[in-house]
Amino acid sequence: MKNIHYTYSTAELASYYGLTPKGLAYYEKKDIIHPERLDDSHYRSFSLEDCYALYQSKFYSNCGYPLSEMAESIHHDDESEFCERIHRHVDAMKEQASRLIRMSECADWIAEVMKGAEKSTSYQIVTRPETVRLHVRTYRKEHVFDKIKSDEFEQWNSAIPINIASLQYSYGMLMVGDQADVDIGNIMLKKDFDHFGFAWNPDLNLLGEKQCMFTVLSVDSEAINQTEWLNPGLKWISDHGYFLDGDVITGLLAVINSGSKKMRYDGVWFPVRK
């Protein structure tokens, strides 16, 4: 039996829970609340029971429950099932939170690197961390749709900016210069690859820790097959007594409009040795 001492209008209840009248009607349609009609009109009266239902719906929603499970969850009568469901969804929330925190850390790193590059071009000898690289295609190869590879690429892109777009210029091509059949792909730190459960396959390559010269360089986004944009880095290496020691790997930081061109800014790792 409903408690007649606690009744609320559509406007009152909607305001309490940040909903619109149409939103309340949707909850009614989903069998979550059961308002009474007033005098056969379109006006509705909501009870304390409806308040409890909306409270629980907010609770479940904020715990990651989809609306499709809401009515069943609210009207259950099994305490152990309630606990199991909560723990299951809380685990999913923790995983999502971990992913968001890592995304924010990666985005912050990109912003800091770009901020430094705005002031002046810097060259640093660093240890490139262990990295997983996904091969997508080469520059000269026509893009062919493949459902399996497309699904994998979609999964990787769902992790931007934990994953970032990457170009790979082979040592041999750089020694020749001019144009290169650059390898187009994506990179992700090995620790993130493992933590977020990405699957290994033949299109992946593990890049171990490596001494590199790291800098930020820019190139017309339509001219990535040219190698001239890497020349400032190669010159710095030569001027400071180092030798190139492997393929050059880049990571896309930003694409900025510059007049009629779109310039891509990449963090570039040049493997070096003395």
Image (spheres, rainbow, N blue to C red):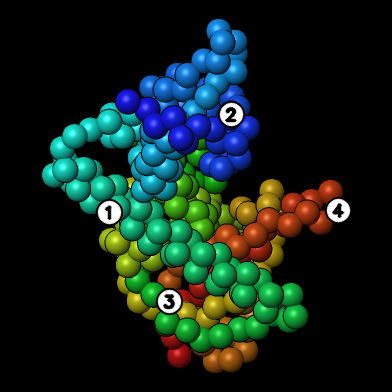
Q: Amino acid at mark 4?
A: Gly
For residue 259, the mark is 4
Q: Secondary structure at mark 2?
A: helix
Q: Earlier in the sequence, mark 4 or mark 2?
A: 2
Q: Amino acid at mark 2?
A: Thr
User: What distance separates the C-alpha of mark 1 from that of mark 2?
Assistant: 35 Å
User: What distance separates the C-alpha of mark 3 from that of mark 1?
Assistant: 33 Å
Q: Residues within 10 Å of mark 2 (few under 14, many from 20)?
A: some
Observer-nearest residue: 254 or 235?
Answer: 254
Marks 2 and 1: in contact by CB < 8 Å? Answer: no
Q: Earlier in the sequence, mark 4 or mark 1?
A: 1
In this rendering, the label closer to the viewer, 1 or 2: 2
Q: Is residue 135 visible?
A: no
Q: Amino acid at mark 1?
A: Asp
Q: Examine the image and state in which quarter residue 11 appears.
A: top right
Q: Secondary structure at mark 3?
A: strand
Q: Examine the image and state in which quarter residue 48 appears.
A: top left
Residue occupying the point 78% across, 54% down: 257
Observer-nearest residue: 105 or 45?
Answer: 45
Q: Secondary structure at mark 1?
A: helix
Q: Judge whether 176 appears above or below 60 on screen.
A: below
Furthest-top residue in this view: 40
Q: Amino acid at mark 3?
A: Arg
For residue 128, the mark is 3
Which residue is denoted by mark 1 in the rendering?
91
Q: Return the x and y of residue 132 as percentages of the image width and height.
A: 36, 61
